[in-house]
Image (cartoon, rainbow, N blue to C red):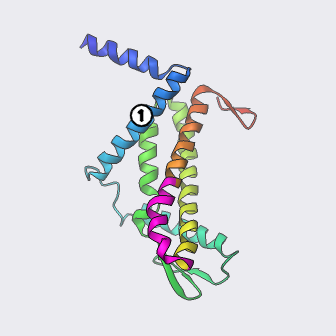
Amino acid sequence: MAKLKEVYIQVWSLLNEDTARGKGLRLGYFLLLYFFIRIFLKAGWVNAYNIDSPVHRLLADFITRVSVFFLRLFYGDIAVSHDFIISISGKPCIELLPGCNGFTHIVEINLTLSLYPMTLKQKLIMLPVTVLILLFAAVLHFMILIPISYNAREWYGFSHNYFTKTLFFAFYFLCWIIWEKLRNGKKMSGKSLN
């Protein structure tokens, strides 16, 4: 048991180094944490993906309404129904299913944040920031898919399965960069984060 504690202390001190090696190890730790949490949740051991929950409906409502608000600049006759179906010129083009509203991404990345080597104060600061970043990503995801489903339906599957998933991973990486800056007390926008 003492040997295990020694190994834990050594690994934790490596993760907390303020060197390139420490940052690389933290990136690896972030990726491992994220993928283990994702596998755990996807395996069904935790019902974080209940698509009938009020949280899912609230997020779907928010995302569809914000998307329609901004896309009215390009499509004057865009509308959203009570069941989250977007129509342009009276033609239904896309439905936001509750499982595709970003809730799973928010749960996964915030569980990862909860286990990331930061102080509790830093985690409490980053929780709402991370949620806002991922809400922006979810709205952007849907705003990209609406014109594609309306104008080039044959590209919808590719765009949904590859392009916008890559977009979400880019936003995960952005979250990690911000976590690192906060963790190390670096300045962003000329203001100290600590």
Task: Say which amino acid is labelled 1.
Answer: Leu
Is residue 54 in sight in this rendering? no
Q: Is residue 41 above or below residue 88?
A: above
Choose between 128 and 183: the one closer to the eye.
183
Looking at the rendering, which quadrant does residue 151 occupy? Answer: bottom right
Closer to the camera, 182 or 156? Answer: 156
Residue 13 highlighted magenta (yes or no): no
Quarter of the figure with residue 55: bottom left
Residue name at image x 39 percent, y 37 percent: 33
Residue 143 position within the rendered picture, expressed as x and y whole percent measured from the top left: 58, 67
Label 1 crowding class (10 Å Cα cut-off): few <14, some 14-19, many 20+? few
In x, y percent, where is residue 120? 50, 31
**15 displayed left or right of 89:** left
Q: Is residue 159 magenta?
A: yes
**At 59% across and 38% down in the image, what residue appears?**
178
Q: Which residues are magenta?
A: 151-166
Residue at left 53%, top 59%? 138
Q: Residue furthest toward the bottom? A: 90
Under circle 1, the secondary element is loop
Q: Residue furthest right?
A: 190
The quadrant of the rendering that contains the N terminus is top left
* Residue 102, above or below 109: below
Please tell me which residue is depicted at 54% across the width and 48% down the height of the picture. Answer: 170
Q: Would residue 190 be visible to someone looking at this image?
A: yes
Give percent across and percent down for residue 192.
70, 30
Measuring from the top left, give residue 25's x and y in whole percent: 46, 27
Q: Which residue was labeled with disc 1? A: 115
